[in-house]
Amino acid sequence: MLLQATNLTKTFGGLVAVSNVDIHVGQGEIVGLVGPNGAGKSTLLNLISGIYRPDSGSIIFNGNDITKMPPFKVCKLGITKTFQLIHSFPEMTALENVMVGALFGDEDNGNIKDAKHKAIELLKFIGFSKDKIHLPVKNLNLMELKYIQLARALSTNPKLILLDEVTTGLNPKESLQAIELIKKMRDNGTSVLMVEHIMRVIMGVSDRIVVLDYGKKIADGTPEEIANDEKVIESYLGEKYIF
């Protein structure tokens, strides 16, 4: 098992954001994470990536206990994360933004030439326009910014990538393109744990789906199993999902 998190709990004051949650991700697996607003999805990603430290529970990644590791060490071991709000260096070019991640992920402590080559290859991999790689990212549209964030995350050589609502703000055509890119990432050797609200995306891309409600895991199964789970229908879907 690539990732095994057990009995994770996280509170903020009197609010229990995540309560005794178990979650696992296998090698080459795409796992969707869904639930109502405030269910604890983003908090769970932040626990796994080291941004938050759990009050209790354990996180084992690729045989390493990362429960109390800071984010930069977690990243070095092979977990990277994208964010709902896109973080970039607006005055730097698309290429330079990806190079930042490549330099951090370089085991040889940052070789500019190698980082540039790697960034170019990753931009090509995600299908980024060759004509725009030297443009400042402040001049790019939303989908292009999301792709830059993905390329920068991939540049750290992750074994597992955590995606937090990567298709938010995209139109249906762009969302379908994002689905294909996520599958391509998986086929290239990167497992995926993704938070998503758009059901056609999560049902279309996930091998397995985990559902949270009020910080607790209420279901874990294939898209078909989740679509027919009475607890999930009652707490989240509202009605059966039709494929």
Image (cartoon, grey):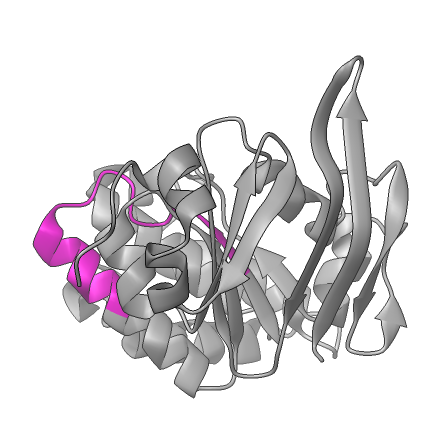
Q: Residue lying farthest top?
A: 14
Quarter holding residue 94: bottom left
Report the magenta residues as a range.
Answer: 162-179
Instruction: Give yes or no for residue 36 being in the magenta stretch.
Output: no
Q: Residue at x 47, y 39 (%)?
A: 87
In the image, is residue 180 above or below residue 194?
Answer: below
In the image, is residue 234 above or below residue 200?
Answer: above
In the rendered view, does 41 fall on the left or right side of 165?
right
- Which image quarter holds the C terminus? bottom left
Residue 133: image location, x then y, percent: 27, 62
In the rendered view, does 1 fall on the left or right side of 135?
right
Quarter holding residue 216: top right
In the image, is residue 178 above or below residue 29?
Answer: above
Q: Which residue is drawn at 23% across and 49% down?
A: 143
User: Can the viewer see residue 225?
Assistant: yes
In the rendered view, does 145 fall on the left or right side of 2?
left
Q: Which residue is drawn at 52% across and 83% down?
A: 28
Q: Residue at x 42, y 74 (%)?
A: 207
In the image, 21 versus 179, the foreground residue is: 21
Instruction: Give yes or no for residue 171 being in the magenta stretch.
Output: yes
Residue 24: image location, x then y, percent: 67, 67
Residue 189: image location, x then y, percent: 51, 85
Q: Residue lying farthest front?
A: 230
In the image, 115 versus 76, the foreground residue is: 76
User: Can the viewer see residue 144?
Assistant: no
In the image, 204 versus 42, the foreground residue is: 204
